[in-house]
């Protein structure tokens, strides 16, 4: 059996830095090449992180040495790069979301299955010590059977601090497609797949004004919902409420809480790998912080790639797999479908609840 697989990164923007840096801590894969539309940027990253090859995307996909393509492009081209990589005979690990459109996500899965290749997708934060500690508490019955949950990601958008916030207000942006994958993936990892979706969505402000530099004062036309309120029915029988918003100035709501038949659980920010985790059983007078039971508590982006690579070598199903990523995308699109039709949306997909991550 191979000791590690070789990977190539497509997309050398800001998010790539943590992937390049973290690759050195995982023995399961080795980044040997990188590519970007801006070849100079690819060369800069190659020099910065001691990557042997800086390519165009076409050159990287043609390199027979590469087993896995790590797709870190912008969401609007996630599907194209994933499909091109699969057609080139390579496994794919992508940043979230799997794609912008449901039909493109389905094409990715169908192509991978036809070619006998694996597709995996961020987020992999649910593999970290924080959410895995929550999973152990639930599996051990500490709060009983999950009855319901709440999830909130609410702020007032990116125009106050991001130098180029336009993308977040166009197709492929918005708070649910941007941040929803973290929250939905965590909920599915903890409570299983979703069978029904209700949603209300709106554009609150038709125009945004950038107040960050260097484009202070520039106007952005908003073309995607910025307030999404939803209700989720899980196959297990549990229900959850979720809000993602770029229209909220201030709030005092948790990231995720799960309410069980014997107690309640405070889940840490699903955009992180660590804690804190709090529990309070039915017979307790106060919340208790639980020491984390699992490792990988710092920014371990790339952990999902390591699990994918070992899965390929061992012939097992990876945890951050394509079925999970497509189910998340299907549910995300379902909020808009439900809002537009005034009806529940029943996902066309499902997935297995990911197996707990080992404490290694």
Image (cartoon, helix red, strand yellow):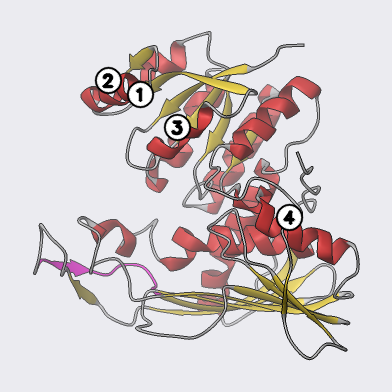
Residue 327 percent coordinates (x, y) = 66, 54
Magenta residues, as a range? 218-226
Q: Is residue 223 magenta?
A: yes
- Estimate how packed mark 1 is, as few (under 14), some (14 to 19) or many (20 or more) residues with alpha carbons within 10 Å: many
Which residue is located at x 63 percent, y 66 percent?
A: 276
The quadrant holding residue 35 is top left
Q: Quick one: SS at disc 3?
A: helix
Coordinates of residue 306 in the picture (x, y in percent) = 64, 31
Mark nearer the viewer, 2 or 3:
3
Q: Residue at x 37, y 74 (%)?
A: 246
Say which residue label 4 marks: 132
Marked residue nearer the N-terminal end (2 or 3): 3
Give coordinates of residue 12: x percent, y percent. Answer: 34, 32
Figure quadrant of the C terminus: top right
Q: Residue at x 74, y 20 (%)?
A: 313
| Residue named by callout 1 | 35
Numbered circle sitting on residue 21 = 3
Would you say the residues marked 4 and 3 are in contact, meaning their CB atoms lie under 8 Å apart? no
Whether residue 193 is visible: no
- Which residue is nearer to you in this view: 181 or 228? 181
Indicate the quadrant where residue 282 lies.
bottom right
Tell me the mark number nearer the camera, choosing from 2 and 4: 4
Local secondary structure at mark 1: strand
Label 1 to label 4: alpha-carbon separation: 33 Å
């Amino acid at each position: 059996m191979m000791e590690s697989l070789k990977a190539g990164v497509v997309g050398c923007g800001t998010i790539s830095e943590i992937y390049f840096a973290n690759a050195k801590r995982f023995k399961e894969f080795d980044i040997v090449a990188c590519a970007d539309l801006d070849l100079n940027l690819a060369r800069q990253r190659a020099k910065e992180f001691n990557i042997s090859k800086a390519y165009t995307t076409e050159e990287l996909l043609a390199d027979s040495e590469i087993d896995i393509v790590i797709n870190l492009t912008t969401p609007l081209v996630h599907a194209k790069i994933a499909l091109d990589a699969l057609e080139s005979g390579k496994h794919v690990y992508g940043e979230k979301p799997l794609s912008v459109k449901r039909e493109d996500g389905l094409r990715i899965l169908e192509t991978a299955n036809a070619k006998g290749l694996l597709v995996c997708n961020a987020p992999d934060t649910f593999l970290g010590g924080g959410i895995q500690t929550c999973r152990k508490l639930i599996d051990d019955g500490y709060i009983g059977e999950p009855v319901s949950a709440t999830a909130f990601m609410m702020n007032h958008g990116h125009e106050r601090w991001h130098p180029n916030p336009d993308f977040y207000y166009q197709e492929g942006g918005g708070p649910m497609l941007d941040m929803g994958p973290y929250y939905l993936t965590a909920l599915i990892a903890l409570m299983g797949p979703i069978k029904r979706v209700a949603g209300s969505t709106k554009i609150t402000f038709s125009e945004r004004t950038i107040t960050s530099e260097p484009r202070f004062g520039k106007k952005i036309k908003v073309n995607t919902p910025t307030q999404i309120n939803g209700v989720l029915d899980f196959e297990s029988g549990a229900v959850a409420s979720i809000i993602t918003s770029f229209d909220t100035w201030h709030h005092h709501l948790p990231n995720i809480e799960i309410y069980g038949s014997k107690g309640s659980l405070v889940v840490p920010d699903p955009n992180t790998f660590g804690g804190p985790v709090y529990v309070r059983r039915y017979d307790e007078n106060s919340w208790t912080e639980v020491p984390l039971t699992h490792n990988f508590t710092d920014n371990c982006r790339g952990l999902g790639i390591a699990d994918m690579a070992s899965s390929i070598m061992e012939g097992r199903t990876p945890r951050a797999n394509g079925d999970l990523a497509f189910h998340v995308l299907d549910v995300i699109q379902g909020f808009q479908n439900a809002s537009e039709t005034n009806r529940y949306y029943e996902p066309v997909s499902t997935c297995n609840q990911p197996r707990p991550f080992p404490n290694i």
